Image (tube, rainbow, N blue to C red):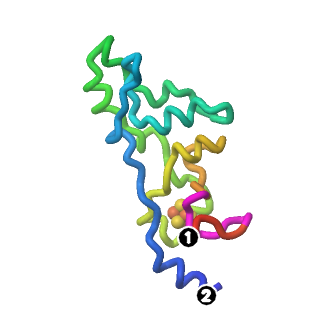
Amino acid sequence: MGRHRTLLSHRASLAGCDIGKLIYVFADGALAVCPYIVFASRTPQSQYNDAEFLVGNILENEVGPALDAYDFHGRYAVGANTKCGGCGMNSQCGKGCPAAVISRGGRIGDVDDEQCPVPGERGRRGLP
Ligand code: SF4
């Protein structure tokens, strides 16, 4: 276990989410703060409504203020789980991709267990 912890401490932590910077306009003019999270929210297992990640329609209104005001990390807490809370990489870790979590039926705040390098209850995941 000690050796394993040492190896993990030398691994890079997960990237953070660029939501709000990677905007996307759908053919009908709807503006998404991230296309992947909108697509994920539309999957059958999603617990989210896609409207949570749309900030207006460029064909119908001025979307700049709504986009500027969109604060994903103020609305949702990534890493709000006991595993991340007890992880030594918590402060440096970006917690992976919320869209991936949603696409698997999870809640924002759950561990992105496809990317997290720390072994979970079901064993080691995410290591190359
Ligand atoms: S447990 Fe959480 S904080 Fe630690 S590496 Fe995995 S996603 Fe990052």
**Residue 96 belongs to the span the image colors magenta:** no
Q: Residue at x 56, y 68 (%)?
A: 117
User: Can the viewer see residue 85?
Assistant: no
Q: Amino acid at mark 1?
A: Pro
Which residue range is magenta in the image? 114-122
Which sits earlier in the primary sequence, circle 1 or circle 2?
2
Estimate the spatial distance between the alpha carbons at disc 1 and disc 2, rounded to whole Å. Answer: 20 Å
1 vs 2, front mark: 1
Residue occupied by mark 2:
2
Residue occupied by mark 1:
128
Quadrant location, the N terminus: bottom right
User: Which residue extends farthest front?
Assistant: 27
Residue 18's disc is none
Q: Answer with left or right where residue 128 lies relative to residue 10.
A: right
Label 2 neighbour load within 10 Å: few <14, some 14-19, many 20+: few
Q: Position of residue 124 (x, y in %)?
A: 66, 70
In this rendering, is residue 9 above or below 72?
below
Q: Answer with left or right where residue 93 lies relative to residue 124.
A: left
